[in-house]
Image (cartoon, rainbow, N blue to C red):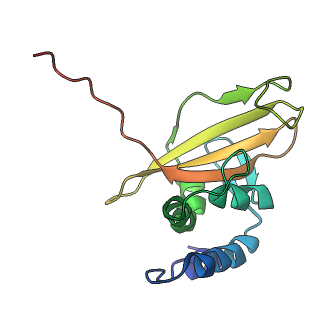
Amino acid sequence: MTSANRSFRVGTTGMTLRDLVALRKLEYSKLKSVQCPLLKEDVLFNNQGFRHLTHDGRGHLRSATVQKMRLNLLTDVCEVIKKADALGAPDRIVPARHPENRLAKEVCYHELYYRFHSRKAVAVILRRIGGGQLHFYSVRYVKKAKTPKKAT
């Protein structure tokens, strides 16, 4: 574990959301890039990735509960990128002319999954805009697949 990752793992219970955001932002600013063996590429950490932890894709503020969950999962991002053993849903590509796409360039998303021993699986979302560098975009718990209900 690198020193940047070790300093992430401080107790955050009882912290205000504002303090948690400040702490994670400081630690996030120390991250530059990490090698992803699964995609055979470096993943950069930029301000867009951090902003997406607290805001949704349309720029609206996320609820405090969701912000705290994502900010606390930030401690696991480098490990997930390095140890991911599976890609999630098929890569999502948003064409440049799609109504959702305000960037006017093709955007490609990748999901990396990793299950920690005693915890839920974590997904890290990576994004590439046009022909640019792959960068961290978000982190979340992996939702359980719905099991079909038995017919009665």
**Residue 2 in view, yes or no:** no
Seen from the viewer's position, the closer of residues 76 and 143 is 143
The quadrant where residue 33 appears? bottom right
Taking depth in this image into account, of 117 and 57 the one nearest to the observer is: 57
Residue 78 appears in which quarter of the rendering?
bottom right
Q: Residue at x 77, y 55 (%)?
A: 48
Q: Position of residue 145 (x, y in %)?
A: 36, 33
Which residue in the rendered view is the most extreme toward the top?
151
Q: Position of residue 108 (x, y in %)?
A: 74, 34
Q: Quadrant of the C terminus?
A: top left
The residue depicted at 57 percent of the width and 77 percent of the height is 8
Seen in the picture, residue 115 relative to 68 is either above or below; the reply is above
Query: Left or right of 44: which side holds 75?
Result: left
Residue at position x 69%, y 50% in the image: 137
Q: Which residue appears farthest toward the left when viewing the image? A: 152
Quarter the N terminus occupies: bottom right
Horizontal side, residue 131 vs residue 99: left or right: right
Residue at 68%, 45% in the rendered image: 126
Question: Residue 1, can we see it?
Answer: yes
In the figure, is residue 102 to the left or right of 135?
A: right
Task: Count up the numbered dots.
Answer: 0
- How far from the left and from the top, in percent, is residue 25? 70, 73
> Residue 131's x, y, as percent?
88, 36
Side of 73 relative to 105 (left or right): left
